[in-house]
Image: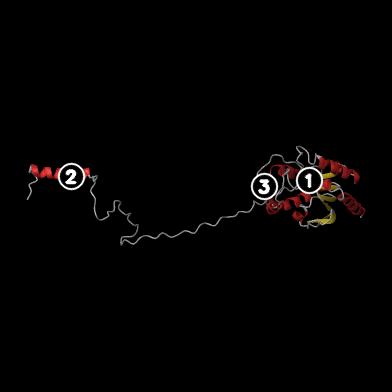
Amino acid sequence: MDDPANPDFLADITGALDWWRDAGVDYHFLDEPREWLAPPEPEGDERGTPERRPQRAPAAPVEEGPARIDPAALPQDLAAFVPWWLTEPLLDEGRSGGRIAPQGAAGAKLMVLVEEPEAEDSEALLSGPEGRLLDAMLAAFGLKREDAYLASVLPRHKPAPDWNVLMQQGIGQVIVHHISLAAPERLLVLGGNILPLIGHELPQRPAVLRQFNQEGRTIPMLASWGLPALMRQPRAKPVLWRTWLEWTAA
């Protein structure tokens, strides 16, 4: 047996290693593959059974409707209604800037209800071109602004309002309550989107006669297109005028 301490034996081993190194083999190789990384231990109980965690079903999205105005919280007199109108968050998604107050006194000869203030309004309702058209209409009717109570469905000008959402919020109940507090002799509704909010169908003509009924009281009502539509459609004005004459002659 070769003695490892024999210098000749050590020289043979060194020479063999040098030969393989010169041949380009400088690592030790095995014929069988070897797992370098240990596989992770499965989670389970003491018997080694993998733990199966229950699958949670994804939570269904919760669709919340718009916050609704509580009818019981509405002011019970016109003097309290105006400050409420200017500050109540639910009327305008929490915004309070740019709101325009109604004008006039309770028991007016005519209440004029429009969909929203004009874009030009800053301190008074209907102070722009729509207001000038309304003043001309009132003059033709033999009235002045001082004889009328002016109000709007929305507290501020709002381009392209979603009337379906407004109905869900209960804005129709606010309008009905507002009319009841104002208690006018007659009601002129200018805007096709208003009638469905107060329980009437959309007008099929430029002007229609209706009755507003609330808590046993009936108020004669004339409904017509909104002031912007009347400005764009001159043919609607004679229809409104004839309907007015028919309405006031009764």
Task: Identify which amino acid the numbered label 3 is placed on.
Answer: Leu
State which tag comes first along the sequence, 3 or 1. Answer: 3
Quick one: SS at disc 3? helix
Residue at numbered disc 3: 90
State which tag comes first along the sequence, 2 or 3. Answer: 2
Residue at numbered disc 2: 17
Identify the residue at the far top of this view: 123
Residue 170 x %, y %: 70, 53
Residue 168 x %, y %: 68, 54
Residue at numbered disc 1: 151
Quick one: SS at disc 1? strand
Task: Identify which amino acid the numbered label 2 is placed on.
Answer: Leu
Q: Nearer the viewer, residue 223 or 6?
A: 6
Label 1 – label 2 distance at C-alpha: 105 Å
Label 2 – label 3 distance at C-alpha: 90 Å
x 73%, y 50%: residue: 174
